[in-house]
Image: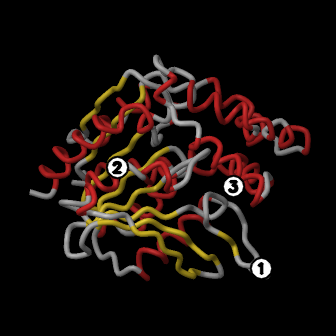
């Protein structure tokens, strides 16, 4: 039945970036913008998109530095979350997305938070799958990053390189997963291939810049309090980086937030894609009612 809603693959030039994206469902339906994270690309949504496309227009770009997206030659580009958000915001304008729900994961969260704070009237609902918006969700796994944020010395920056090895990417996919045979290897293999193609330096730039996201949390929390968007935090509870308190925290500033835990790791969609799709369809159906 999923052939009724094929996923199409495109690229569009935005601000000197050839931005690759996947799209499914009629543009006349309510839009869901899917933002991937570290160690991934829009490929992570390959199975989710056909499940949503019967009721929603779903669109998933590859962030600059990831997947099939390419910064064009002679384009000066700073790999910061501000810059990523500028590109994605310009993409939503180019695609004429007036209003949309957000699905954010990992790095997709700080990109999505910037979009929501800047354009609160455009956001219809938020689904955060292991995408932090509160400091208490950041585990001890962030210690090397925190050290580099406090002192971005060459040595502290160099310590972040290891997060981008194939072994470390694989670990991030499998850690906290009860049955690792459910994890398809292509996810981390493609992520590693993109790092090999694009370079590890952009990845290290983003790890160093992540500290800026925490400084912006106050703006995000003010947005939640003022606009109270329908929010679903659906979380792999064994995530080594983003712990369950980070999911529960969404309720603090937005009493409407719903929290669902799944017995899996960081890349919950890889093992619990069906549950995530079903929970999202129920949640979005109520949010858009």
Distance from the alpha carbon under mark 2 to that under mark 3: 22 Å
Seen in the picture, residue 104 relative to 156 is either above or below; the reply is: below
Quadrant that contains the C terminus: bottom left
Q: Residue lying at the far top in this picture: please name it.
A: 178
Residue 160 point in image, percent of width and height:
78, 39
Contact? badges 3 and 1 (CB < 8 Å): no
Taking the spot 91% from the left edge, 45% from the top edge, the residue there is 154
Q: In the structure shown, which secondary structural element does the residue marked by tag 1 occupy?
A: loop
Q: In the structure shown, which secondary structural element does the residue marked by tag 3 occupy?
A: helix
Q: In the structure shown, which secondary structural element does the residue marked by tag 2 occupy?
A: helix
Distance from the alpha carbon under mark 3 to that under mark 1: 17 Å
Taking the spot 50% from the left edge, 53% from the top edge, the residue there is 43
Contact? badges 2 and 1 (CB < 8 Å): no
Mark 3 or mark 1: which comes first in sequence?
1
Mark 2 or mark 3: which comes first in sequence?
2
- Can you tell which quarter of the image residue 100 is in? bottom left
Distance from the alpha carbon under mark 2 to that under mark 1: 33 Å
Q: Circle 1 is placed at which residue position? A: 73
Taking the spot 56% from the left edge, 72% from the top edge, the residue there is 19
Identify which residue, 40 or 260, lies in the foreground: 40
Residue 13 point in image, percent of width and height:
57, 82
Mark 2 or mark 1: which comes first in sequence?
2
Q: Nearer the viewer, mark 3 or mark 1?
A: 3
Taking the spot 24% from the left edge, 51% from the top edge, the residue there is 228
Identify which residue, 32 or 180, lies in the foreground: 180
Residue 184 point in image, percent of width and height:
52, 36
Q: Circle 3 is placed at which residue position? A: 194
Q: Circle 2 is placed at which residue position? A: 48
Q: Nearer the viewer, mark 2 or mark 1?
A: 2
């Amino acid at each position: 039945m999923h052939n009724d809603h094929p996923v199409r693959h495109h690229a569009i030039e935005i601000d000197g970036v050839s931005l690759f994206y996947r799209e499914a469902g009629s543009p006349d339906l309510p839009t869901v913008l899917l933002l991937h994270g570290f160690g991934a690309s829009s490929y992570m949504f390959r199975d989710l998109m056909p499940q949503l496309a019967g009721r929603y227009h779903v669109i998933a770009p590859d962030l600059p530095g990831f997947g099939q997206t390419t910064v064009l030659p002679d384009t000066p580009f700073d790999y910061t979350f501000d810059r990523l958000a500028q590109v994605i915001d310009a993409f939503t304008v180019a695609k004429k997305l007036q209003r949309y729900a957000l699905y954010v994961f990992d790095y997709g969260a700080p990109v999505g938070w910037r979009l929501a704070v800047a354009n609160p009237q455009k956001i219809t609902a938020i689904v955060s799958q292991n995408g932090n918006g509160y400091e208490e969700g950041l585990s001890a796994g962030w210690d090397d990053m925190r050290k580099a944020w406090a002192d971005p010395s060459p040595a502290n920056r160099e310590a972040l390189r290891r997060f981008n090895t194939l072994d470390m990417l694989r670990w991030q996919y499998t850690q906290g997963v009860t049955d690792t045979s459910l994890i398809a290897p292509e996810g981390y293999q493609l992520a590693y291939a993109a790092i090999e193609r694009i370079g590890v330096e952009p990845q290290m730039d983003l790890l160093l810049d992540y500290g800026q996201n925490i400084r912006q949390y106050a703006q995000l929390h003010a947005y939640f309090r003022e606009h109270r968007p329908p929010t679903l935090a659906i979380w792999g509870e064994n995530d080594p980086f983003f712990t369950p308190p980070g999911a529960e925290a969404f309720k603090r500033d937005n009493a409407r937030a719903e929290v669902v835990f799944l017995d899996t790791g960081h890349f919950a969609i890889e093992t619990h894609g069906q549950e995530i799709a079903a929970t999202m369809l129920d949640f979005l159906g109520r949010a858009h009612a």
